[in-house]
Amino acid sequence: MLATLVFSTFAAGFLAPTLVRRGLAHGLALLPAALFVAFLSWWPEVTSGQVVLQQHAWIPSLGVSLSLRLDGLSLLFALLITGIGTGIYLFAASYLRGSADLPRFFAFLTLFMGAMLGAVLADDLIALLVFWELTSLTSFLLIGYEPEKAASRRAAQQGLLITVAGGLCLLAGIVLLDSVAGSLRLTDILAQGPMLIDHPLTPAIILLVALGAFAKSAQAPLHAWLANAMAAPTPVSAFLHSATMVKLGVYLLARMNPGLGEHPLWSALLVPVGLLTMLTGTLMALRATDLKRLLAYSTVVSLGTLITLIGLPHPMAVTAVVTFLLAHALYKACLFMVAGIVDHATGTRDATRLGGLARSMPVTALVVVLAGLSMAGLPPFVGFLGKELMYEAALGGSWWPVGVALAANVCMVVVAGVVAWRCFFSAAQPTPSTPHDPDVAMWAGPLVLAALGLLFGLVPQWPAALLAPAASAVAGRTVELQLSLWHGFTPMLALSGLTLLLGGLALACWPALRSRLAGWSAIDRWGTDSAYDHAILGLQRVAAWQTRRIQTGSLRRYLGTFFAFSAFCLLLTLWLRGGFAVAWPDWNEVGPEVALPVLLVLASAAVLRAASFMAGIVTAGMVGFLVALTFLFRGAPDLAFTQFSVEALAIVILLAIVGRMPFHEVDMRRRGERRRDALIAAGFGLVATLVLLAVVATPFDARLSDFFRAASVPEAHGRNLVNVIIVDFRALDTLGEIAVLTLAALAAAAVISSVRARRADEEEAA
């Protein structure tokens, strides 16, 4: 059933363009709505503590299966993805109405939703990785929705490179985790928590998995791509960059917490990175004026908060994680859509040019007030519950998390005030377009999300029914969760009051504060976004340098480099694996073929000293004939006669081709180049000899020979083993080789014909 829901979403992604072209764009919202209802049907099982596991065969030979898991954490994410997705679909159908690329947009958006659902439901790490990378690919396509704009192209490329690089780190971590735990299933891995803690590879696993999550969830210094992704249309920002994709890294760390959370490196890594991200996002948010960038940097703050809470050892931290995650998803998706409504209605997103919009946009004003109060952490909104729990978890440790959490929440108050109070209730300002409320499809989704933020605060028992099993999944133990707006006069309440006081003061001073922070040019010059540009420029310069050094246009140099590097790798492998073993022959059994090695060396030297292509071909043929004689003396007459035939035919054909091609009669290489080529050839030959001697010294495994000897007559009806192997047992391989040779012959014939035609034209012109 779970797999059906995931893959039906992908199927709908391919049908979406057809439906949009038929004028059914708004009707596509029925897809996420139906998925929401389907996932909601598991509410009784999951809220009672059950875990739904489903497994489907995928790659049995590699031990990979499509295993899906639905518990409190995955159901919370699935409901957020589909529930918020319903509002996003309605919003996008009106927001992008008239766009020629709307069918493509909904196709990518639906594929992204399917990838997100697959990632949060996957119980197999390989399946999770596949869906993980699909989210990166589809987000790249969505961010680059307007490829004609340079900002869209850059933002899409930056997001893809950073998140995919993180995905490679995650892949390495999965490989190590599989080698340690002996399983790719999360259920099996998390059950081995004590063993994982003591394993020497666990620090490397934690580091690699965390790097993948940090890149996905925009943790400093990998955060720049999130703000730049605001070049995407507002529905993309509201869906991907507030409630879904950017929280996928948070989901992964929360999912791995029961197995890795007890290791000392877990907290030592997650807490500092999360705190640094909170401070970085706070600084960047306070200097922004674009509404979407304001919200994007506040999202960075929130993501840092979630990562910090996962790393904190306080018992209330897991409760704070799931509660704050829910609250943030509700108000942030809502506020992003409000920013799109403002931009759509006024023609600008610059907060310094907006004011007094409440008079002409009363419905939007109601929505932004509800969402802004939740973001600021005021009661009775669910944002207040998340903030109180955050402070309670931070108070269990040193003063650093408390101080940074206070600064982050002050930033939240300022951003909420700028978006809600300054834009809607300050003095009116002229705008490029006349402000007006949009149609119901655009404000219905934000209004529902804002109302849920209030409802869940007033009746916290409703979300607590799901948040309890979600917190249990993060903690790896049963968590009793009781949410309440009032806990008496506590240190958390005092911190909340201080947050509002400092936030109000900062909001009053926001114009001056923003101007001062924006004047710090060093942030733009030395920040991570500038570092990304320098890294890309450096990569381009290295690529240009490599191209000049390697891609010289000389086939001889390409072959020389290939053979020299191959010889080095083979020699290194022999040395590391102890392969310098030589099986000396029994000299009593050596016959006249003892002279063949000497003749082969002389013939090879003649090839090196050949002064023309003609002489080189003939002397190379001598080497081939001597090899055939070696086969003959060693008891393989059929192979020897085959070699004789091939060498004779090759010499004739090559001489015929070279005679008609415009090659130089004399080798034009300088003495130094000839010595270099001779050294490479001799070195490669020596290494090849050592490899063959090592192979001969290895005890012979006769199982394959015995099989061919026993099966050649009854199965292939032939007694010549070589012919039977080539023609019967490896028939497709032989067919492929014949096809390659045929194509090569046709290409050579085409070259010869073109040369003849050119010569004929030249003679006719003369």
Image (spheres, rainbow, N blue to C red):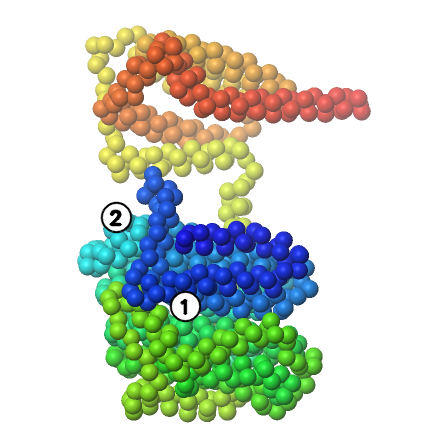
Which of the 4 image quarters holds residue 750? top right
From the top left corner, tell me how far across and down residue 516 is, in percent: 51, 85
Q: Which amino acid does the dot numbered 1 rest on?
A: Gln
Q: Which residue is drawn at 22% across and 24% down?
A: 699
Q: Residue most toward the right?
A: 765
Residue 401: image location, x then y, percent: 32, 79
Figure check: 61 above or below 91: above
Count of residue discs: 2
Q: Can residue 137 be seen in this view?
A: no
Which percent across, then down, holds residue 481?
29, 75
Give the residue number, with chain letter if any, for mark 2: 182
Distance CA(mark 1)–CA(mark 2)? 30 Å
Left/right of residue 41 with respect to residue 587 in the rendered view: right
In this rendered view, identify the residue nearer to me: 616 or 224. 224
Residue 380 position within the rendered picture, expressed as x and y whole percent measured from the top left:
41, 85
| Quadrant placement of the C terminus | top right
Q: How crowded is mark 1: few (under 14 residues within 10 Å), some or many (20 or more)?
A: many
Residue at x-position 33% and y-position 54%: 53
Q: Nearer the viewer, residue 154 or 408?
A: 408
Q: Dot 2, crowdedness within 10 Å: few (<14), some or many (≥20)?
A: few
Relative horizontal placement of residue 119, taking residue 358 as reference (left or right): left
Residue occupying the point 53% across, 46% down: 547
